Image: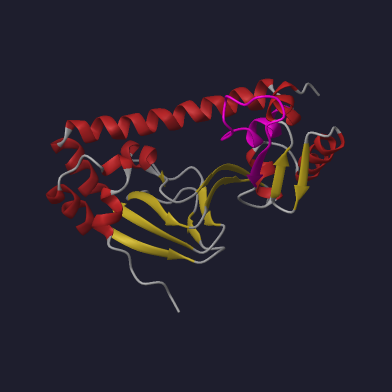
Amino acid sequence: MPAAPIRVQQFLQNLPLFSELTAEEIDRLASATAQVRAPSGTLLFRRGDACTGFHVVVYGQIKLALAGRDGSEKVVEVLGAGQSFGEAVMFLERPYVVFAEALADSLLLFIGKAALIAEVERNPRFARKMLAGLAMRLHRLMGDLEAFSLKSGTQRVIGYLLRDAPEEAGPGTPYDVELTTSKGVLASRLNITREHFSRILHELTAAGLIKVRGRQVSILDLAQLRAYTP
């Protein structure tokens, strides 16, 4: 049985991006918003398709990736609930440069370009939030570029495992990580092969730093993993 439609106004108002908009402004955006149900495996758009708005994930998981001529792919980003995508190409008035695919049954909101730009022009604070969001995404991409260029595969995997871990952790502090998607997708996101990703997990396990059970990774000592030099 399909899930009931969500109340668009309430969902938008609870997102940090739209939290400062008035009820009237939210209503205008909601009137230009469509709910998009995407079962796992659904292709939302292809590279080269026209961008006429942007998406927000209500629930589920979306992969943004580049496709090679040989059928290979490079995962650029994996997005979950509350995250958005497509804003940059929408403002640039250019076609998509990646393709988007649902990795799990998902529900998204698609907000039309005209309504969004109208609110940006009416509300400088909203415009600043849009700019801040795009700047944060650029900052993350620059961090990815640095990691891919200057860090080893092992350092990238360790960085991924520690990305949400508390900075202040005493000796012997454990921490559990749930791999949010398949090892193949994560490996592509980290710019390594699936086999290399698995080897690194085995090496970290053999070093007594982690334990792996399916998608559950238990870090046995945060400080030791941070200090590990392959």
- Name the residue at the right extreme: 206
- Where is residue 191? Give x, y as percent: 68, 36
- Where is residue 155? Give x, y as percent: 71, 27
Is 168 included in the stretch rendered in magenta? Answer: yes
The residue sitting at 41% across, 72% down in the picture is 3
Residue 174 vertical placement versus 114 (above, below): above
Residue 55 vertical placement versus 120 (above, below): below
The residue sitting at 51% across, 45% down in the picture is 98
Left or right for 108, reference 17: right
Instruction: Give the magenta-colored segment's residue range.
Output: 155-178
Q: Which colour scheme is used?
A: secondary structure
- Where is residue 52? Give x, y as percent: 32, 50
Is 57 included in the stretch rendered in magenta? Answer: no
- Where is residue 104? Give x, y as percent: 55, 61
Quadrant (top left, top right, bottom left, bottom right) of the C terminus: top right
Q: Nearer the viewer, residue 203 or 192?
A: 203
- Name the residue at the bottom extreme: 1
Residue 70 appears anywhere in the view: no
Q: Quadrant of residue 84?
A: top left
Q: How many marks?
A: 0
Residue 165 vertical placement versus 180 (above, below): above
Q: Nearer the viewer, residue 26 or 168?
A: 168
Left or right for 84, reference 226: left
Left or right for 103, reference 184: left
